[in-house]
């Protein structure tokens, strides 16, 4: 059974349909990369799954329970953690405080300050520094660490490499590989197709609010993904759902 299922989801911004009849499923331990051009609806879909944006139709099912109407903070407690685009750390708080705030009232599990610092060693010397004084890559590591402190069952990562230097992207992805190897379940929005293909077990491509291609990462060619990304060859996905 998939841990997370999205069924015929519609999400609007006012009158604009940003996500249209999207269905997808994420199985435990897999990394599903959501790719697509700017404005395709990826962020809106992630925010709807996290409970930050109310859908106008369809269902979100988490561990077999319909959570479509469940408020965002309860979804965090249930095990859904979003690392939003732009990171959104508390800038005046230190790395330590950012982690501890997220850890309050969270489920018990593998993730605590110590294990987060082990997964993101870049944070160790920065632990007492204010988030505002960190570089983009350091902030991204802290933002992922903060999400992990809630001991999520599913981690939603929105554009983790956006605005980072190539070296910083390398560092963040190195740590992500460790999480993935440890069995984390991840839904990842990534603009860089190469990066997405390298870490994902499956890839779903969005175009104008719809999923237009979906399949196992090792079964899709770069050309298929690029065509779907730009809408050059519209087709319905193979293997939708897990
Ligand atoms: P990007 O890579 O640029 O973040 P995206 O694939 O994540 O793109 P969304 O940000 O979800 O796409 O945007 C989907 C559509 O919804 C776009 O047409 C966008 O202009 C629109 N949109 C996004 N946020 C808002 C908002 N707050 N108000 C109105 N329209 C919005």
Image: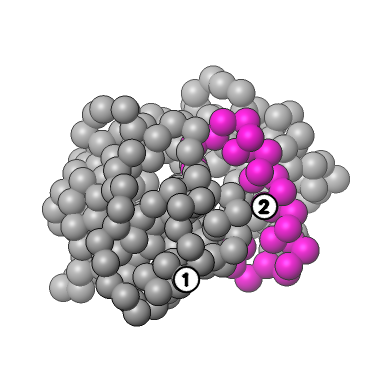
State how far apart marks 1 and 2 are (Cα): 24 Å
Residue 103 visible somewhere in the drawing: no
User: Which of marks 2 and 1 precedes in the sequence?
Assistant: 2
The quarter in which the C terminus is drawn is top left
The part of the chain drawn in magenta is 160-186
Magenta-colored stretch includes residue 117: no
Q: Residue at x 85, y 45 (%)?
A: 125
Image vertical order of residue 105 relative to residue 90, above or below: above
Q: Residue 59 occupies which quadrant of the picture?
A: top left
> Residue 106: x, y in percent?
50, 27
Give the residue number, with chain letter if any, for mark 1. Answer: 223
Residue 38 in sight here: yes
Residue located at (59% from left, 63% from top): 194
Q: How is the image coloured?
A: one colour
Residue at x-position 66% and y-position 43%: 177
- What residue is shown with label 2? 173
Q: Position of residue 88 (x, y in %)?
A: 55, 57
């Amino acid at each position: 059974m998939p841990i997370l299922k999205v069924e015929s989801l519609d999400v609007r911004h006012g009158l604009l349909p940003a996500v249209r009849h999207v269905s997808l499923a994420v199985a435990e331990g897999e990394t599903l990369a959501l790719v697509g051009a700017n404005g395709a609806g990826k962020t809106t879909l992630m925010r709807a799954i996290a409970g930050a944006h109310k859908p106008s139709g369809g269902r979100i099912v988490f561990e077999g329970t319909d959570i479509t109407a469940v408020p965002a903070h309860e979804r965090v407690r249930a095990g859904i953690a979003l690392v939003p685009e732009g990171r959104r750390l508390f800038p005046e708080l230190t790395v330590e405080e950012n982690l501890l705030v997220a850890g309050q009232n969270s489920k018990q599990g593998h993730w605590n300050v110590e294990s987060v610092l082990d997964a993101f060693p870049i944070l160790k010397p920065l632990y007492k520094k204010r988030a505002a004084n960190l570089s983009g890559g350091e902030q991204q590591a802290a933002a992922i660490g903060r999400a992990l402190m809630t001991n999520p069952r599913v981690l939603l990562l929105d554009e983790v490499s956006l605005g980072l230097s190539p070296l910083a992207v390398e560092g963040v992805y190195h740590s992500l590989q460790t999480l993935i190897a440890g069995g984390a379940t991840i839904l990842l929005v990534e603009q860089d197709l190469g990066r997405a293909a390298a870490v994902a077990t499956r890839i779903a491509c969005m175009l104008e609010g719809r999923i237009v291609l979906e399949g196992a990462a090792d079964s899709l060619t770069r050309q298929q993904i690029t065509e779907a990304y730009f809408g050059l060859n519209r087709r319905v996905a193979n293997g939708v759902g897990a």
